[in-house]
Amino acid sequence: MKKILFAASEAAPFIKVGGLGDVAGALPKALCEAGADCRVILPLYSSIPWEKREDLTPLMHFDIRNAWREQYCGVLTKKVGKVTYYFIDNEYYFNRYRVYGEADDAERFAFFSRAVLEVLPRVGFIPDVLHANDWHTALIPVLQDCEYCHREGYGNIKTVFTIHNIEFQGKFDPYILGSVFGLDESKKPMLFYGDCINLMKGAIETAHAVTTVSESYAGEILDPYFSCGLHHILAARQFKVCGITNGIDTDVFDPATDKNIATNYSYETRSQKFRNKKALRAEMNLPAGDMPLLALVGRLTHQKGLDLLRMEFENVMATGAQMILLGTGDAEYEEFFREMQGRYPDAFRAIIGFDAALAQRIYAGADLFLIPSKFEPCGLTQMISMRYGTLPVVHAVGGLRDTVIPYDPTTGKGNGVNFLTYDSGDMMDAIRRAVKLYYDKPNYAKAKANAMRTDVSWKQSAGKYLALYERI
Ligand code: GLC
């Protein structure tokens, strides 16, 4: 049985800040179901809800040396279903208000990365593959390559590094190499890029395989438009880079069992979905009527294409559709959408906040789901909305391009609506087509059925990861 250790800075259901948390929550589960022994290791943040960590079993503690610092490292464990979780405890680093954005993030995650390697023989789990994710754990393949692989027991461990978002690379002042990571000058070429230490670059250089979270994104990041400066590095290592499209946890995201929504429904009973629209409108105090309800749920940042929506907002309202937006993020967007709510009280609601239960009611209640992202490594919301029978309207980029097939009334195939260029006029055109499709009841029903039938589970992708682990 293949032994995999999945290292991540967040993992649902314990701690989730973004899509990485969903992946780290669902992929290991799917790998276990496919016959691997996949375990997960993550920091024991104080922000993990108490009910999720009150029953952890303490295993051991020891000290870890990172440069000149010697730090306490506790290890706790818990099994959920088939997946064993290990938690790295250190109050100084992880008892903070936030998961990310602390001034000493480099040191916090360097500590975690070293801890991951240090615990292996101590917990008696020497994996075949150590799978690291994004810059926070990028030091793992680097340390394995230059230090640990020479140690007894570590020689056969292979490393995989997954890029969930190339925008965040872990760039730091070069002094950090020795004084925080405890690496000597001879390791500088491995980690140095541009004028700084770049952890993601180090992982791309040293991991046995590099993956991204969709096939399209794997190609896109070779282009300077998407690569945030790393295209040269990736092009030189292309032989070991591949894209595997994410899935979603179909147990968690299931309209047939979802406790957050007004009326449960499945593919067979999808005609009942309208009850959720009714309930959502009542909750949002939006008037009833036969017009489509368009939704957007997500981080309000430049990545998500909100500039396009801001530019076209009046035109979106002019289509007669109602719209609900849920999310938090940059103040400029939050303020804009609050203002629009004041201007369009009968048609638009902006809920500036993070509310997972409301998000579910929106997936279930909306007719159309807008994702105009400028870039999207994979994207999860289009898959969730399809599972709930809500048609995604997306910019065909990254994972959105791989998962949303434009509906074609002449063939009856397709599960959403898309636009090909990052352009507000094109987005508007897609929204108009989607609104028109909504009124074309037989075709809308077909597209909705196709969306609900789309395989968004982890099954296929877990198989691809297993094949990759096998290969390396
Ligand atoms: C990041 C990306 C998103 C992807 C997620 C999980 O959040 O922005 O597109 O779905 O990681 O891989």
Image (cartoon, rainbow, N blue to C red):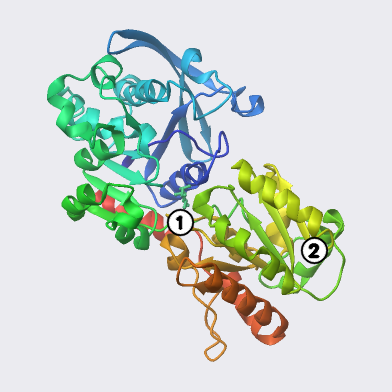
The residue drawn where x is 18% and y is 32% is 145
Q: Amino acid at mark 2?
A: Ala
The residue under label 1 is: 376
Q: Vertically, is 239 above or below 17?
A: below
The residue drawn where x is 55% and y is 80% is 407
The residue drawn where x is 31% and y is 25% is 120
View extreme (left): residue: 186
x and y percentages locating residue 241 in the rendered image: 25, 53
x and y percentages locating residue 173 in the rendered image: 30, 25
Would you say 157 lies left or right of 338 here? left
Q: Nearer the viewer, residue 412 or 324?
A: 324
The answer to whether mark 1 is within 8 Å of ligand 1 is yes
Determine whether the residue tagged by mark 1 lies in a helix, strand or loop.
Answer: loop
Would you say 212 lies left or right of 158 here? right
Determine the CA span between mark 1 and mark 2.
Answer: 28 Å
Determine whether the residue tagged by mark 2 lies in a helix, strand or loop.
Answer: loop
Labels 1, 2: front one: 2
Q: Vertically, is 8 above or below 266?
A: above
Which label's residue is closer to the chain start, 1 or 2? 2
Quadrant of residue 67 within the rendered picture: top left
The residue under label 2 is: 347
Residue 34 seen in the current view: yes
Q: Nearer the viewer, residue 28 or 36?
A: 28
The answer to whether mark 2 is within 8 Å of ligand 1 is no
x and y percentages locating residue 253 in the rendered image: 62, 54
Q: Nearer the viewer, residue 123 or 20?
A: 20
Quadrant of residue 109 within the rendered picture: top left
Would you say 407 lies left or right of 243 here? right
**How many C-alpha atoms fall within 10 Å of the one at disc 2: few (<14), some, or many (≥20)?**
some
Residue 259 seen in the current view: no
Q: Amino acid at mark 1?
A: Glu
